[in-house]
Structures are given as structure tokens and as C-alpha cells.
Image (cartoon, rainbow, N blue to C red):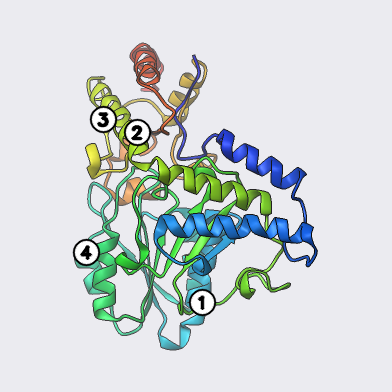
Amino acid sequence: MEVYFDNSATTKVSEAVRDIVVKAMTEDFGNPSSMHMAGVYAERYLKEAKENIANTLKVTPAEIYFTSGGTESNNMAIIGSARANRRSGNRIITTAVEHSSVSAPMKYLEKEGFEVIYLPVDRTGAVCMEALREAMNEDTILVSVMHINNEVGTIEPIEEIGRYIKSVNPEVVFHVDAVQSYGKLQIRPKKCGVDLLSVSGHKIHGPKGSGFLYIRKNTKINPMILGGGQQMGMRSGTENVPGIAGLGQAAKDGYDRLRENVSQMTQLKDDMIAQLEQLDGVIINSRKNTEGAPHIISASVRGIRSEVLLHALEERGVYISAGSACSSNKPAVSATLKAMGIEKDLLNSTVRFSFCADNTKEEVDYTIAQLKELLPILRKYVRK
């Protein structure tokens, strides 16, 4: 049996997405900037994708800008808005548990002279609101907080955060990394005071190399890629029409079935957590039920290194992650787990199971059965 429980890293492209991508690549392959009909046909994919995506967020199509994925969207949002608003101040606020595509641009901006404040989180990974209140001042120009943590599945209170930020200063730009929440939660940027929202296509059964950035109308942000003036000059370069077509299809399909998909994933998550908690030396770091993301379980397995467990399960056809896929090939300890105060001896013994709506209870039961066999065996070889 083969079980894929690494859907937070990437998802399988759906058949509907595959079909529209192939059609855009092989039939309607014109350049959308061309004035002839081949270009017009290609441009229609962009228009339809914008409309599909805008409808899921209840925003206007003109506020959707296509990118190569979550990393570009986050970089564009953070660096572009920080530079555009520099005359108003130089303080940026983020959290200690952000994805590297947010934390790395923050370090980059620190070298440019910006002051970056990293908010602490509690044992569950939730942002400390009191720390946010203390950090906000008249020099604050940007606040960036992820919606769902990619490692442990904590849902950050972005509506509460957005309300507070805008009550202090409506001009402060609020950016949300929604890479793990888009397609899993109902998101209303305008209701939450969100000015910039980042999304990646391959997390929602769309193509890799596709994504978008929502930019609220009149938000001050500088472009980072200059050239042909595509997308109103905000993101130059010939658009990835097949990828965008697939992204638009994935967005529509995901939100058409949002309720059913979330229900399926939540049931799997709660069932697996209940069974994991029965295993000796397994500690759950994720919230249960709807208090946490419907698709992510972080579990620390005392006495077994995460890489060892990952490969042992892989040999039995079960695919999981040892953390964020963007950093799982590096030996560094997770900044998220450290910020949450996870015990030191568990930092290198934590794995992530992540679901999609196509996963089944049979796959959960199979994985638990393998763990029951493997854990006692692997612990025998732990160095004393």
C-alpha cells in the first residue's frame, strides 16, 4: 500500500487541472500579450482564472496578480511594500514562526536598515496579542503574519490582528501568508483588514510554479520584476498561461467543495491524533478538531530522530515530512518548534503528517499499524 501524507509539501494535480493545463499548452499556446486571436485565446485563461480566484476571496479580479508561487508572492509583498512605505517609518512586525520565504526577506530588509520585530508565540504556536500591542508604534509600516503554520497547523487570529492593526493606524500594511490556509479555510481579506495575501498553486492540487498575490486596491507596493509591463507593471514577464489556467481551475474546484473537503480532512486528522496518542512516547503538537488546521498533524516521537522515522515509513510506502519541505533537506533545528518551547530532546524527533481530501481512513489505519511495529524496533538502535 502507498500512502501520501505530505500534502502540505505538495499535492497531486487533479484531472481537471491537468486537462486545462494541457489544452493551454498544446492548443491555446499563444502569448497573451499578442494582438492576434491566438493571443486573445491565451488571455482568456488569465481573465477566467482571475475571476475564479477573486470569487473565492470576494475581491475584484483587478486585485489578483499572478506569480510563480508562495515564495515569490511573499517576497514581493514584504520587500515591495516595505520599500514603498519607507518614508512613513521603518518598523516591520512579524512572528517567530514564519516560513523561510517570509523570515529570509525580513533578514534581507534588516540589512537595508529596517527594524524587524519578531513576535513570540505560545505553546500552541499562536501569536501573543499583547506582544503585538507593545510592538506597534508610529514607525510601524508593515505587519506580516501567516494564517496557518506550515509545520504544526496553528491557525493565527488574522481577523483579530487585522482589526487591531487598522484601529491603531489604517495606513499600516497587513500581509498574510495564506499558502497553507487557502483552499482549507474561508478567507475574506477585506473583512480581516488584509492588504496583501500570498497563495501557492501546488498546495491546492494546482501546478507547481503557479501562485498569486492579492493586493488590495490603493495599497502602496513597489514591483520587484521590471520589464514588459505585464499585469499593469506590477509583475512583468510573459504570464505562465498553462500554470495560471490550472491555478484558476484548482481554486474554483477547491472552494466549490470546501465544506466536504474540510470535513473529510478533519475526520482523518482527529482519527489519527486519537490513535497516535495511544502510542508510547508520541506527543502531539497540533490542535484538535477545528481549533487547528484540518490537514496538519505535528507529532514528536521520543527517542527517534525524525529522519530515521521518515525513511523507515518510506520503506513501507508511507510518505511524511520531517518538517517544512522547503527546509527538510537542511540539518537546522525548526525555528517554529523552538519558539513554541518544545522540549530540546524532541526538536529533532518531530514529524508532520498532512492530508488532502483524497486520503482515506484505511490509509490512516495502515500508517498507525506500521508505527506500532516500527517504534519499538527503532528505539532499540537509539544511541545511549
The disc at residue 221 is: 1
| Relative to 95, 227 lies left or right | right
Can the viewer see residue 57 in this picture?
yes
Question: Which residue appears at 32% of the width and 69% of the height?
Answer: 193
367 up-or-down from 131: above or below: above
Instruction: Name the disc covering residue 129, or none.
Output: 4
Q: Any mark on residue 67, and which?
A: none
Label 1 – label 4 distance at C-alpha: 26 Å
Left of 82 or right of it: where is 261?
left
Contact? badges 3 and 2 (CB < 8 Å): no
Distance CA(mark 1)–CA(mark 2): 36 Å
- Mark 2, residue position: 265
Q: Nearer the viewer, mark 2 or mark 4?
A: 2
Mark 3 or mark 4: whose residue is earlier in sequence: 4
SS category of the residue bearing label 2:
helix
The amino acid type of the residue labelled 2 equals Met
Structural distance between the alpha carbons of marks 3 and 2: 9 Å
